[in-house]
Image (cartoon, coloured by chain):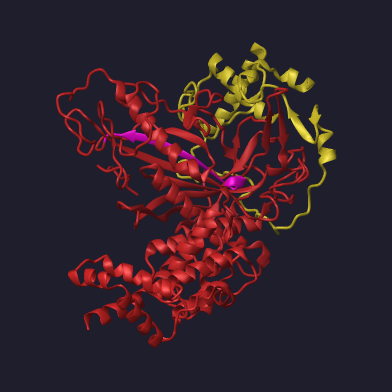
Amino acid sequence: MATPILRWCCPGRRWVFAGIGSVFRHGRGVPTGSTSSGKRGQSTVAQQPLITAQKPRKGEREWAAVVGLEIHAQIASNSKLFSGSQVDFAAPPNSLVSFFDASLPGTLPVLNRRCVEAAVMTGLALDCHINRRSLFDRKHYFYADLPAGYQITQQRLPIAVNGSLVYSVCVGKRQSQMVTKTAGVKQIQLEQDSGKSLHDSLRSQTLIDLNRAGVGLLEVVLEPDMSCGEEAAAAIRELQLILQALGTSQANMAEGQLRVDANISVHNPGEPLGVRTEVKNLNSARFLAKAIDYEIQRQINELENGGKILNETRSFDYKLGCTVPMRDKEGKQDYRFMPEPNLPPLLLYDSGSLPTGTDPQQVINIDQLREQLPELPRVTREKLVQQYGMLPEHSFALLNEVGLLEFFQNVIKETRAEPKKVTSWVLNTFLGFLKQQNLAVSESPVTPSALAELLDLLDRKAISSSAAKQVFQELWRSKGKTPAQIVAEKKLELMQDAEALEQLCRSTLEAHPQVVTDVKKGNPRAINKLIGLVRRATLGRADPTVIKEVLERQLSS
Amino acid sequence: MWTRALWLGLRASAGGRRGFPSKADPQGSRRVTAELIEHLERLALVDFGSQEAVARLEKAIAFADRLRAVDTDGVEPMESVLEDRCLYLRSDNVVEGNCAEELLQNSHRVVEEYFVAPPGMCCPTWLNRLSHSKLRMQ
């Protein structure tokens, strides 16, 4: 996959370092590292008036950023990768640790079948080539949370290589258009997680909990095909959705089930790639894009000021909102990779190469796993667009919230209303209320049946759309009441008697001759006054559009 | 530990702290430099306390170098003596764990069911100061 050497580093965003008074399109405060951009004494192009940084002028350089990602996803399995102890997020310290996890002498690794299947399924979902033969290696380094002194990983020959991750970013002025992008998947490998170290700064000691040591991880390495924080965040989001749809990982960043490291460098388009830094500790979906963009900007500032970028590892400090060098990395690490002597090569088969007469439990058939792959998010979205005629961005929104798609589909099942109406109500009204009160779909006081009933009333024109909103609000507040009950209680039914409406309109026109003259003179707002009067007369039980129709008809006759 | 006696380093990491020779060094360096010793001591937590130890290391390397006498052009390297064995796949059941008390008995210091790591574990400079004999005493 070719690294994009673009003029535009990413849709709608340009990294231009201009002189005094220019506008950084990204709008973020410039970090006061070396020099603050706004306070430069002399600018080489000081003569020209600076408007915006739209076009690069002579003396200014354009920058393109290159971002690659390494993602570690915890495999959703009952037991660990090489031992039979349990995988659980919250348990008493060191209670889920076997002798092997604690690296006691005489213990050996035994590979968990479920983890291999998870890796193969993920590889298939990302269009990778699955290596029929893959190998395990030891990666050595000393740290208190790595009891063995090495991590078992797959450095030489990983289980899957050469795939691609398709994702979408929002472009355009109102972020309403979706553009598809692809990031190459360099490889997917199985490896062990380390334990957790808790730093007790009070007594300056480090406490170690090995519950997480040995848990299976999928490391997904993405090629440096992304060019800014937004693209990286979108790619990560899509990978999360894929892993969740497959069931191979819950991929919850907050619980540490998905961890991301970014490799970032900048260069001038057309020139060779720059020195890259690795940014670790990007463990929050919210700050991922910010951290990457900060680092890109930091590197640009550094280079523009004549500095150099060190090939170092940095960490993102959430409180300060900037990347800082990690102190404990002195020079480059030598991991002394060696083959794991206790594990033979991992062999996978397909239907054509299955050995006969073997225990099916001991053999993994790639074709069988491919057939059993669940529907991927991309396919689900396409189906939604085709089946219900919704915009792509709506399908994204439906899949972006846990349980929302199911809610939507349940409403569709029970209502006669048009899919477009349902989409609009679910994505605007329903989701709006959820977000306002910070609730998950599962915590919603309104059930799909209730919303379906409400939409039916609206569809039958039994109530107006403004009345429907009122009913929805009441549904949200008071559980147990049905829409029909609320409509009856609040007397929100639309007037069904056309004759009575005609009468009311006529009497309103007669009672306000001045307004009628205004309308006839051509004052467009006068009619609204009449509509308002009629509405009040009907106690809000008539549809404003119908009132307008009747009034206009009566006025013209 | 066997790692001490024979460092065969299948893979020398590119750009290591002091670019030490990769495995494909044709002459085979008979001399092991002080820099290399320092590097190895940090990586493997061993103590080449004496000149004898360095000499022994050089002899071990020379011994292993005799492998180069064999012409291995076009021969696929054997990476594991287990290459013909079947990799056993375990079913995903929970069968171990729940022995915190037992495991914590192995630790020199314990705080409320946590292992306590040796002080300064987060920065590797302490590794230089710690010799193998001291480790044994811990």
Q: Residue at x 43, y 64 (%)?
A: A395
In this view, A168 is above or below A2:
below
Quadrant in the picture for residue B106: top right
Residue furthest left in the image: A47
Q: Position of residue A236 (x, y in %)?
A: 47, 49
Magenta segment includes A259: yes
Location of residue A396 with respect to B27 vertically, above or below: below
Q: Quadrant of residue A519?
A: bottom left
**What colour has chain A?**
red
Q: Is residue B73 magenta?
A: no
Residue closest to the eye, A273 or A404: A404
Q: Which residues are magenta?
A: A254-268
Q: Residue at x 37, y 29 (%)?
A: A30
Q: Main secondary structure of the magenta part?
A: strand
Q: Quadrant of residue A545?
A: bottom left
Front residue of A150/B27: it is A150
Give the quadrant of the C terminus of chain A.
bottom left
What colour is chain B? yellow
Q: Residue A169 versus residue A432: which sits nearer the camera?
A: A432
Does residue B33 appear in this view?
A: no
- Residue drawn at (78%, 44%) of the image: A95
Counting from the top left corner in percent of width and height, residue A155 is at 53, 43
**Residue A203 horizontal/vertical position (percent):** 73, 23
Q: Residue at x 22, y 80 (%)?
A: A556
